[in-house]
Amino acid sequence: MTVGRSFPTRGVLRRPRFSGADAVVAAGMVALLYAIIRLGRSMNTRTLSAHVGGAVSTGLANLPYYAARSLLRMFIALALSVVFTFVYATAAARSRRARTVLIPLLDILQSVPILGFLTITVTFFIALFPGSILGLECASIFAIFTSQAWNMTFSMYHSLITQPAELDEAARMFRLTKWERFWRLDVPSSMIGLVWNGMMSFGGGWFFLAASEAITVANHSYALPGIGSYVATAATKGDLGATFTAIAVMVVMVVAVNVVFWRPLVAWSEKFRIETSEAADAPRSVTLDLLRRSHVPAALARPLKPVGGLLDRATRPLGLADYPLQPPPVRRRVGDVFFAAAVGALIAFTVWRGAVYLDHTAGFGQFPRCFGLGLLTFLRVAVLVVVSTVVWVPVGVAIGMNPRLARYAQPVVQVLASFPANFLFPLVTVVFVAIGLSLNIGGILLMALGAQWYILFNVIAGASSIPTDLRELADQYRLPRRQRWRQLILPGIFPFYVTGGITAAGGAWNASIVAEVVNYGHHHLVASGLGAYITKATTTGNFAQVLTGVIVMSFYVVVVNRLLWRPLYHLAETRYSL
Amino acid sequence: MPESESPPADGAVIVEVANVHKRFTSPDGSALTVLDGINFALREGEIVALLGKSGSGKSTLLRCIAGLIAPTEGTVSYRGAPVTGANPGVAMVFQSFALLPWLTVRANVEMGLEARGVSPEERRVRAEKAIDRIGLDGFESAYPKELSGGMRQRVGFARALVVEPDALLMDEPFSALDVLTAENLRGELLSLWAGRDFPTKAILLVTHNIEEAVLMADRILVLTSNPGRLRAAIANDLPRPRDRRSPDFEGLVDRIYAIMTGHPEPVGDAPALSEPTGASPTELPLPHASVGGLAGLLEILNSRGGRDDLPQLAELLSFEVDDLLPLTDAAELLGFADIANADLQLSPVGKEWVEADILTSKELFAARARQRAPLVRSIVTALENTKDGTLNERFFLDLLGRGFTEEAARAQLDTAINWGRYGELFEYDADDAELVLPRPGR
């Protein structure tokens, strides 16, 4: 495991300043949400008659099968994320016009609490495949996809726009076709960031898997065969033994996927490093060494080679990676105007329709209420970030400053961050019930179960990246503890901490949707907050309220990002980057 | 190689550059001219060197010829047809090699063939031949990471030559290599060029190394900076192989040094450059030289009797022209030295400055910089006209933006800050990005 890398990769967070385009796209997002709801609603009336998805048994014998089903969902979602990333990032990086819409859109998408989507997507997909479990599968996969795709796309987009100029020139000079350029240059040069962000996002995906396998939408309970619904069923039954078993299986699965899939991939992707010097501490993987020693991969690749050549030839008509040096300026301007007008009209129309819809259903009166509830959830997120910082920064620094410890601790923390915290909710709920703790306070703890690790992970990475000579300097001058923290450690970990903080806060907002309402056996705990509001609206099928709640929550996330995290990130980039 | 093999000057034109201008738009909307009315033709059978200081637009010109960027005005044509995209008849060798690190040597060399749709079998044969010719056999399955700089650039050459381009473009191909490796590779390239079956009909070499140009080229085009214009076209008929120690060789090097350090003809009644008090910061840019470097050079000059030959100084310090010329330009601007016929002569003031104690030398430098460096003078005047003697650097960057690109403006201001700080004319507060007059009594 490489020590010293942050998640998300730091370039992922480098964004253009807030522009008019962001506002337009935010409005466009609301519009899109509304469109999907309308679609889902108009379709669900005639299809939601049958109860889809059978009951999930808590018998131990079923657990391996359930785990396999869940794992399959994760990988389908990952494959979709990769395809989405390829298309979206390439379009954003290569087309000037597409970029003006796609990048702000992605920025907003990343801030939207994914779990709020669930209601909408579940209804939509069930409507798409009436009477079949396929709809539920799709909804679950889509939820996981949305937790993985954005970071990966940003990572690839960032790699593409920072591609060394001379490689771009070489590709055009040697007349590569668009297809060849994509596979020979674009994908390899983005590979390291893509694999790293893919691995970390995959870890985050488990949480959404667990949350999306068993869900109640519009007074219907759905359950897919999977480890997430297994835990949910165990919790409903109050079966502690089954819960513990599932947690153990989950840990094994997270670790196994890391060892068998991600670590070999991370080690393999090192060959795509553009800097000509070797990384000082290149990641290694036993599995990869094994694969490299065996002849199986080569034997499998041989018959594929002609296929690659065939594809190269088949895609030749797509044209060269080169572009005309002097596009006719008039046509270009006319195109720009037309494009802007079309996008503007589309957004204006759907925003208007959405506003009318909200006015006729939930009414705008819901907005003040949502903002009030949002403030409560915001306070929970704030307390969580502050407390996690106070607790984990010293621990992370202690681990990170000790290289040997860091090498072992970082994979462990990574597993902790990957582990879906919602698996633990039933157990923690038992404790809350036992000691009589209100979920208004306890909710913070539930949200922290998943989110806090991002801070620890990034602080470890930051502390271990403080150069040895600076540390030796501090020892040499016998800097007192206070001064050492003020002048060496805090500035050194700051950029990493900010990355961790943004990710932790984002994770906490998402978690609030499942953490502000929890059930264990016949105990039903509810906190007041925006997350509970969205969950309640989901359960009763009040789409207008879900829409209002999601809009307000996205608003909070975006505003806090702009007012707090983005300036801190900018400061970290300009002043404290080593 | 006998002299009769020196290429005929009347070979067919491969690439023609006609009245090419390149302007970039600076941040405040005004245009910056990088190339100003360039005309020349690259003919079959010749090696042409484009020689210029950094900022002379020579790489920009090369990229216009390669069809990678569009000229603002004028045309580039290949075999009579205007170039509208990547030039189909040329291949390029890059300063940074631009190899794909995830491909083996062979796959890198085959890249251009693959893109042209050449069959795998033929690809293999042709790549093998190019690899052998360029001295890479045995390294076919190595990755670029495993190779030294010189070997990497060989891959760059093999990759360019294997597609048998009409003309080979080279963008400072040897400047990232150590001295010995570069010399070795130059020699090998020249002997390949002299051979009968060299697949390329002409070579265009961009360089800032005068000796390299004299060693390799049949014609040397000297570009001026700010804006880039062709100052001189020098035919080089020295017999090959060329001997760096021969008087003719050294004479030509000296001549080109003199051309490159010479002053551009004054336009109209603009003030003469030796008394630059009236020029504005954009008319007379500061050479990018640090005070430390300037002092070092002049001290060496002083210890060598106050006068020395520029090529010799460059060799002594193992400096490239790009390292040396900003220092000599700065020395001239401040009146610490004069250049005549490629000789650098320490002036009396310069001698006084070098020999003075630290405080006196600071005062001397401050007076000179204030009097003769337009940007330094402008900054001091502007600061003196504010109430608190403080101005944000943005103010000056915006002013400089009228005549420089953003990067060049930054470099100008950095140099001015370096000079102003040394002379204690003003201070720079990096936290607030402000320039501040020193407060009296501190």
Image: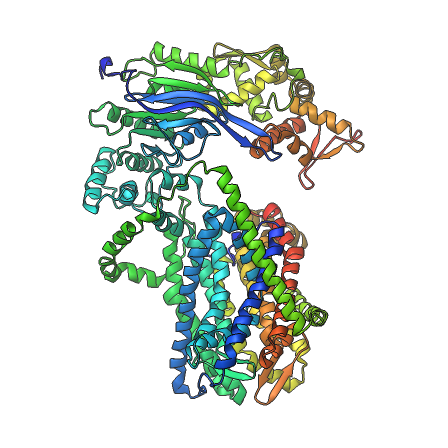
| Residue at point 58%, 79% (across, down) | A541
Q: Is residue A29 left or right of residue A320?
A: right
Examine the image and state in which quarter residue A296 appears.
bottom left
Residue A173 versus residue A313 in the image, above or below? above
Residue A344 versus residue B35 in the image, above or below? below
| Residue at point 60%, 71% (across, down) | A448
Q: Is residue A317 left or right of residue A379?
A: left
| Residue at point 44%, 52% (across, down) | A90
Whether residue A412 appears in this view of the structure is no
Q: Nearer the viewer, residue B117 or B406?
A: B117
Residue A559, x across and y down, in percent: 66, 59
Residue B314 versus residue A575 in the image, above or below? above
Residue A22 versus residue B392 in the image, above or below? below
Residue A375, x across and y down, in percent: 70, 68
Q: Is residue A373 left or right of residue B54?
A: right
Residue B428, x across and y down, in percent: 68, 34
Examine the image and state in which quarter residue A380 appears.
bottom right
Whether residue A270 appears in this view of the structure is yes
Colour approach in the figure: rainbow
Residue B400, x across and y down, in percent: 63, 29
Q: Nearer the viewer, residue A296 or A124?
A: A124
Q: Nearer the viewer, residue B65 or B5?
A: B65
